[in-house]
Each structure stands twice: as C-alpha cells, then as structure tokens.
Amino acid sequence: MRNVSGMSGSECYPEKAQRIDDLLDVLGHRHRREIVHYFENHTDEPTATLDSLVAHVAGRVPGGDREELRMTFAHAHLPKLRDHDWIDYDPRQELVRYYGHDGVARLLGEMRTVFAE
C-alpha cells in the first residue's frame, strides 16, 4: 500500500494518540484557534474579557457578527477550552484566564505551514 501522506508508521505515535486527538479536537474549530492565537500572539496577559476576545475574532473572521460570536464563545468554545484545561472561564464576570498547552506554538506553526503550501 502506498503511503499517500508521506508519514511512516512510526510517525503516528500510537502511544500519544489520545493526546493528539484531544489537541485536534480543541483546535478543530477556527474560533477556538483564534482564541488561542489571541493569547499566544496578541497579549502578554494571561487574562482577557469575553468582549476583548470577541472583538479580536470579529476583526479576523469575515462576517464575524459580534453578538453571535459572544453567544457561541460563552456556550460552546470557552466551555470546550475549559473542559480541556486550556482556560478558566468565569461566566458571571465574563473573564477568561488562559493556561495554554505545551507545544501549542509549535503546533499552530506547523498548521500554518500546511495551509500555506
């Protein structure tokens, strides 16, 4: 069988499969990637308000309706990032504290390279 992806069998890291699946699940939506991008590239602060995240993403995603983003962040994307231990989110204060993930900068860089080709 021809290896279409260019990966050898040893590059799939079966012992790390769950960790890789979790990373791809978290980064699988552009809005979650943009939230991570904000903390990794646009601020030195580990905390941000929901409004600042919405404003950042609305400025980077075409057709980003702020009210719709606000709702999906509060009810979908921030809880998912919280459930995977990337952030803490206080919905009453609308405050996000970012913890990140080991290797996220490298992973995002590799993803950019793939899409730039």
Image (cartoon, grey):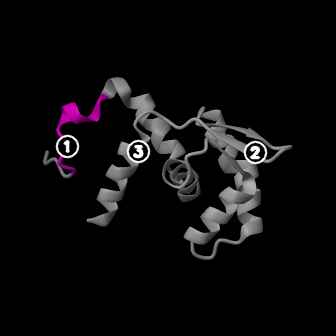
User: Given the image, on which type of amino acid does mark 3 rest?
Assistant: Ala
The image shows residue 71 at horizontal and vertical percentages of 77, 58
Dot 2 alpha-carbon crowd within 10 angstroms: few under 14, some 14 to 19, many 20 or more? some
Residue carrying label 3: 105
Disc 3/disc 2 C-alpha distance (Å): 23 Å
Looking at the image, residue 84 sits to the left or right of residue 113; the answer is right
The image shows residue 72 at horizontal and vertical percentages of 72, 56
Q: Which residue is drawn at the image coordinates 68% and 46% (left, top)?
A: 78
Disc 1/disc 2 C-alpha distance (Å): 41 Å
Which secondary structure lies at badge 3?
helix
Looking at the image, residue 113 sits to the left or right of residue 38; the answer is left
- On whether residue 12 falls in the magenta region, the answer is yes
Mark positioned earlier in the residue sequence (1 or 2): 1
Mark positioned earlier in the residue sequence (3 or 1): 1
Which secondary structure lies at badge 1?
loop
Residue carrying label 1: 7
Of 34 and 24, nearer the camera is 34
Disc 3/disc 1 C-alpha distance (Å): 22 Å
User: Given the image, on which type of amino acid does mark 2 rest?
Assistant: Leu
**Total tally of numbered discs in the picture:** 3
Q: Which residue is drawn at the image coordinates 44% and 33% (left, top)?
A: 102
- On whether residue 104 falls in the magenta region, the answer is no
Please identify, in this view, whether the residue under mark 3 or under mark 1 is nearer the observer: 3
Looking at the image, residue 71 sits to the left or right of residue 37; the answer is right
Of 15 and 32, nearer the camera is 32
What number is the disc on residue 95?
A: 2
The image shows residue 54 at horizontal and vertical percentages of 68, 61
The quadrant of the rendering that contains the C terminus is bottom left
> What range is drawn magenta here?
5-13
